Amino acid sequence: MLRLPAIRPALLLRATAAPRTVLSLSTSRVGLTSTALLRSAQFHYSASPSFQTSNASRSTSSSSNSSSSSNNNSNKTNSNAPPKLSLLKRISLFTSFSFYSVVVLSGVGLLGLVIYYFVSELLLPTSDVQLFNKTFSIIKKDPECQRLIGTKMQAHGETNESGTNNKWARTRPLASKRGMDRYGREHVWLQFHIEGELLEPGTDALVRMEMIRDPHGSNAFEYRYLVLELPNHPRVYLIDSTPNPAVKAKSSGFLGVKWGKKDENNDN
């Protein structure tokens, strides 16, 4: 067998103690270097006044910036606040606002009134224009009217003293009238003129009509009469629904005996 040489205990102690001494030396050197660096930094900080002044200037600039921003904010709030108006200015503003409000409301009311009259006078079936169109269509289709007036008929409103030769005569409004009777029925009277090729120049035919609407009946306008009047010609009744007056019967006297003077014609 191979024998190892014997190692002395003193050598072992030296070998184990050597690393510890090296480690302690290294740590002491690190501590010295760190303390030296700290002292040098403190020395440089205390020795450089420019660094201190720069820090002071930074602090003063930040404080000035904050004060300027606060002043700007206060100025903005003051500028956004509405200016105070005098009493005369307030009165003038209130007067102008009231005037323009009245003008706008008046315009809206006038527009509504125009729309109402436009619908009631032109579009509704019970308007004068619609009743005129209905009556004129009846006359144009009637054979008797075609024989007396002609097939080329033209209707217009009331004429002036110069006759129908006036170019504005056909644009005149129709002569119409509305009313209520004691039974609650609505009456419409309408009158207009008709021209035709068979009539003499400067003459025209006159149309008269009356319509009744019974609210308790059909609630629609019905003709009571429709008459065509021509110069030098008897009236032509196209529609006649007027009730005939009752013929009063002759009285035979009291108790069948006629009292009073006898009729000479009967005696003869």
Image (cartoon, helix red, strand yellow):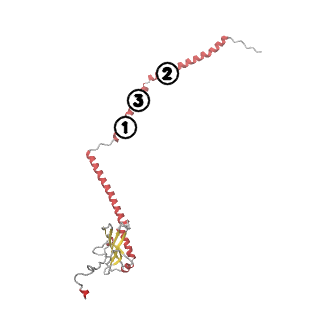
Q: Name the residue type under label 2.
A: Leu
Query: Where 148 sits versus 107, above or below?
Result: below
In front of the other: 153 or 244: 244
Q: Name the residue type under label 3.
A: Ser
Spatial CA span between label 1 and label 2: 46 Å
Q: For the C terminus, which image quadrant? A: bottom left
| Res 208 quadrant in image | bottom left
- Residue occupying the far front of the picture: 255
* Left or right: residue 186 compared with residue 9: left
Q: Secondary structure at mark 1?
A: helix
- Mark 2 closeness class: few <14, some 14–19, many ≥20 residues within 10 Å: few
* Left or right: residue 264 compared with residue 191: left
In front of the other: 17 or 218: 218
Q: Residue at label 2? A: 38
Q: Residue at label 3? A: 59
| Res 229 quadrant in image | bottom left
Q: For the N terminus, which image quadrant? A: top right
Q: Residue at label 1? A: 73
Foreground tag (3 vs 1): 1
Identity of the residue drawn at 34% across and 69% down: 212
Identity of the residue drawn at 56% across and 18% down: 27
Identity of the residue drawn at 53% across and 19% down: 31
